[in-house]
Image: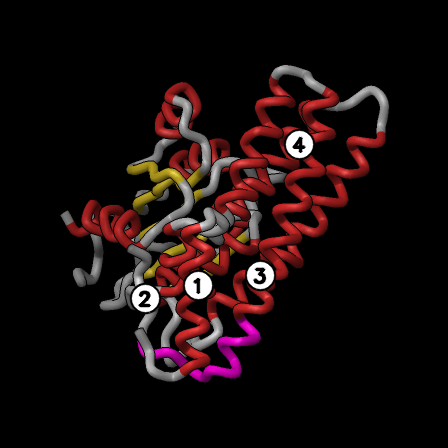
Amino acid sequence: MDRNPLRRQLQIMRKSFFDQGYLDEQFVQLEELQDEANPNFVEEVVTLYYRDSARLILSIEQALERKPFDFNKLDAHMHQFKGSSSSIGAKKVKAESTQFREYCKSRNREGCTRCFQQLKKEYATLRKKLEAYFQLARQAGPMETACRPK
Amino acid sequence: MAAQGRHGGRKSNKMTALVVDDNMVNQTIHHRLLDNLGIENEAVSNGKEAVDIHCSGKTFDLILMDMDMPVMNGIEATRKLREMGIRSMIAGVSTRSMEREVQEFMEAGLDDYQVKPLTVSKLISIIHKING
C-alpha cells in the first residue's frame, strides 16, 4: 500500500469500485494502456463514453415516450449503449443494459421503463464516482503502475 | 516483420491496421491497443468508408471489422472487400456471440472473430495468425 496518503486513498477508492461491482476487468485493460505518453488515457476514454452515450440515453428516453414502443429500435439503441459500457468496464450499467434488452425481446413495456430508470441511476452513480476518482488522481500525481484487484 | 505478409499489405517493416467501428469509444481503445503494439493504424466509421479507403489505393495488414454499423455493416463490407480481391487479415470484432450471427460474419470472409471488448491478449492472438 502506498505511503502517500492521497495515493492510499486513491487505491482504496479504486478497490471499492471492483469490490462493489461498479467496474470489471475491462477497466484494468484500459489502465494498462495508460503510460507516460498517454497519462490520462483512462479519463479521456471515460469522458468520451459519457459524452457519446448521452446521445443514446436521450434516444432511448424519446423512444420510451412514443406509443406504441418500437422494441426493435429500443433494442438497437441499447445494443450500442451496452457495447460502449462494456468497453469501459461499467459492470452494473452493462448488467442493466442486458436486462433491458431481455425486456425488449419479451416486449415488456413496464420492464423496459423500470429497468431504464435503474440503468440511469447506475450510470449517474458511476459517473460521480469516477469524476471524484480522477479528481483525486490529479491531486495525487502520476502513479507508477496500476494495482491489480485481488 | 515480413515486407509482404501472407495476408497482403504494403511493403514496410511496420505493420498497418484499419479499425472499422462506428463507436468512438471503441475506435479510441482499439487505436490505442494497436499503437501500444507498434502497429500504425487508421480508423473509419462504417463499412462503406472501409471499402472507399481501399478503393483509394490503401491496403492494410490487418482490418478490425465491427459488425453493426450504419450505411454498410461489417458483413457487407467484408464480402465487398473480398470481392475486390483484398487479402488482408480481416478480424471481426463484435459484441454478438450467437453462433448463427458469428457464422454469417465468418462466411462473409473473416479470418478470425473476437468478442468485444478487445483486449491485448485477443489482439495478440489475431496478430499471431498473420505471422503464423
Q: Which residue is mark 3?
A: A129
Of badges 1 and 4, the one in the foreground is 1
Q: Which residue is mark 1?
A: A14
**Dot placed on the residue nearer the N-terminal end, 1 or 3:** 1
Eyeballing the image, is B126 above or below B59? above
Is disc 4 in the same subunit as disc 3?
Answer: yes
Spatial CA span between label 2 and label 4 = 33 Å
Is disc 3 in the same subunit as disc 2?
Answer: yes
Q: Which residue is rendered at x = 64% and y = 22% of the image?
A: A104
Quarter occupied by the N terminus of chain A = bottom left
Q: In the image shown, does B105 or A122 lie closer to the viewer?
A: A122
Quarter occupied by the C terminus of chain A = bottom left
Is disc 2 in the same subunit as disc 1?
Answer: yes
Q: Which residue is mark 4?
A: A115
**Dot placed on the residue nearer the N-terminal end, 3 or 2:** 3
- Neighbour tally class for label 2: few under 14, some 14-19, many 20 plus, Cα within 10 Å: some
Residue range (magenta): A134-144
Q: Which residue is rendered at x = 62% and y = 53% of the image?
A: A125
Eyeballing the image, is A10 above or below A149? below
Spatial CA span between label 1 and label 3 = 10 Å
Q: Which residue is mark 2?
A: A147
Amino acid of disc 3: Lys
**Local SS, label 4:** helix
* Chain of the residue where label 1 is placed in the rendered structure: A
**Local SS, label 2:** loop
Q: Residue B106 is drawn in which quadrant?
A: top left
- Neighbour tally class for label 4: few under 14, some 14-19, many 20 plus, Cα within 10 Å: some
Amino acid of disc 1: Arg
Amino acid of disc 2: Cys
Tag 2–tag 1 contact (CB < 8 Å): yes
* Chain of the residue where label 3 is placed in the rendered structure: A
* Chain of the residue where label 4 is placed in the rendered structure: A
